[in-house]
Amino acid sequence: MKCLLAALNMALLMAGCGGSDSPQESEDNSFNASFIAKCEACGNGISKQAEECPRCRHPNPIPIAVLKGKADEKQRLAQLEVKRLEGEHAKRLAEMEKKALAEMKAQALAKMEANKREKAANDASKQKRKPATTLLDLEVIGGERNPRK
Ligand SMILES: [Zn+2]
């Protein structure tokens, strides 16, 4: 039993080693391929980041393209940022408008409520007929001559 386990472990180890060997190699290849370019003029392998071929001084188009791509990306990002800011601004404006509207509505409601209350108070005071303070009131309270009764 112990022997079988050991053999299994050995097989696993070997399989693990064999498996990890090949992808590492291909990774190295892709790593090289993505950083090394071929000179258009002389075929010399040059760094993609080199601006010209070290052998023939032929300009390397890749860094220019990369730089252009970076510039484009930067512009795109800047535009996105502007759009984002515009969106935020619009959102903030909308929120402010909403808030202002809500405030106006609340104020209008409060005013209406106050008016209503004032009217109710007036009505109540009219109905209560406080002690007369003017001649007219005295006449009205006097009673008999009140045409409204
Ligand atoms: Zn060259």
Image (tube, grey):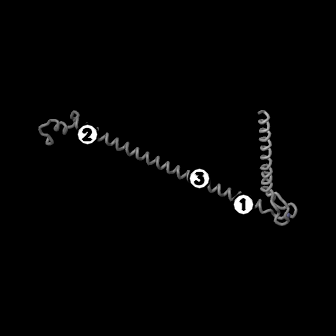
* Image location of residue 113, percent across then percent down: 34, 42
Disc 3 vs disc 2: which is toward the camera?
3
**Residue 85 visible at all:** yes
Q: Is residue 62 toward the left or the right of residue 85 in the image?
A: right
- Crowding near the residue tagged with mark 2, few <14, some 14–19, many ≥20 C-alpha atoms within 10 Å: few
- Crowding near the residue tagged with mark 1, few <14, some 14–19, many ≥20 C-alpha atoms within 10 Å: few
**Numbered circle sitting on residue 84:** 3
Q: Quadrant of ligand 1?
A: bottom right
The answer to whether 110 is drawn above or below residue 50 in the figure is above
* Image location of residue 56, percent across then percent down: 87, 64
Tag 2 residue: 123
Q: Is residue 75 toward the left or the right of residue 144 in the image?
A: right
Q: Residue at x 37, y 44 (%)?
A: 109
Q: For the residues marked 2 and 1, what is the alpha-carbon distance in whole angstroms?
A: 80 Å
Q: For the residues marked 1 and 3, what is the alpha-carbon distance in whole angstroms?
A: 24 Å
Q: Is disc 2 placed on a helix, strand or loop?
A: helix
Q: Residue at x 66, y 58 (%)?
A: 75
Contact? badges 2 and 1 (CB < 8 Å):
no
Q: Amino acid at mark 2?
A: Asp
Q: Residue at x 65, y 55 (%)?
A: 77
